[in-house]
Amino acid sequence: MSNFPFHRLQTDLAALIARTPAGQRLLSEPELAKELGVSRATLREAMRSFETQGLIRRRQGSGTFVVGKSPALDSGLEVLESLETMAKRLGFEVSVTKLNVEMVLADEDLAAALDVPVGTRLTRVQRVVNTDSRPVAYLVDILPENSMHVEDLPANFHGSVLDFLQARGDSLASSRANVSAIGATAEVAKALEIQRGDVLLHFYSQLFDGEGKVVDYSLSYFIPGYFHFHIVRRVGS
């Protein structure tokens, strides 16, 4: 398909989404593809751009729904802070669901990320962050059990491991984060109620204490349309 027909498809979809009330379900993919005269694969590719903008939301087994345009959380990345702290500072209301805290054993990848022996007992904290009752981020923190035990978390824990460690008085010095765009795995897609393979903004980070020891390895998955991250840089000499 040439660029012009694909652009026309996006224009037609934009018009359809604009005139559909928020919360209403669109036609099924086969019906919509037939109506617009395109293949399902081409339709799915075009719809992904609208999903990353937060205009539509595909729910596995239920269909595609128009959700309207939500304000994005816009923040710099120069200072490490939790998503919850960032949202509060910007006046956003977020909630945490699907919280799961468990002990796991370090495999080779986790052992390398945390600089611990294979088989070390670790605490893994998984949760989904929501805004306006929509899942927008899936967060995973993994720490050595001697740094944070499953039973250390209070009953009113709201999902921020960073805030918990800071409130506890842990010596935290720096964080190294890698940022990329990836397709959602089956596990992440289920948690965020999107389709497998949908594009997500992915951070994987190591949090270091004052002695340079890794105290937390985190994996964060963001639906792009709800987040605008930026970095302020000095001009080099």
Image (cartoon, rainbow, N blue to C red):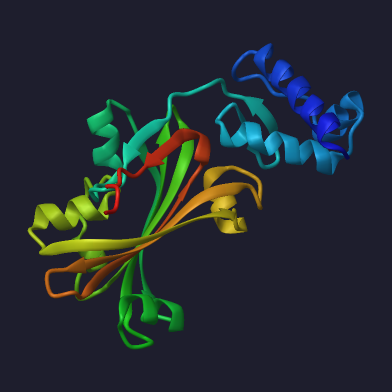
Q: Nearer the viewer, residue 209 or 137?
A: 209
> So how many labels did they put on this image?
0
Q: Residue at x 30, y 84 (%)?
A: 116
Residue extending farthest to the left is: 169
Q: Residue at x 60, y 48 (%)?
A: 199
In the displayed structure, 114 sits above or below 160; it is below
Q: Residue at x 89, y 24 (%)?
A: 35
**Residue 12's x, y, as percent?**
78, 20
* Residue 105 in view of the camera: no
**Residue 41's x, y, as percent?**
82, 44
In the displayed structure, 66 sits above or below 196; it is above
- Say which quadrant the C terminus sits in: bottom left
Among the 4 quarters of the image, the one containing residue 23:
top right
Among the 4 quarters of the image, the one containing residue 56:
top right
Residue extending farthest to the front is: 237
* Residue 4 in view of the camera: yes
Among the 4 quarters of the image, the one containing residue 89:
top left
Residue 17 shown left or right of residue 36 in the figure: left
In the displayed structure, 83 sits above or below 216; it is above
- Say which quadrant the N terminus sits in: top right
In the displayed structure, 119 sits above or below 63; it is below
Residue 163 shown left or right of residue 28 in the figure: left
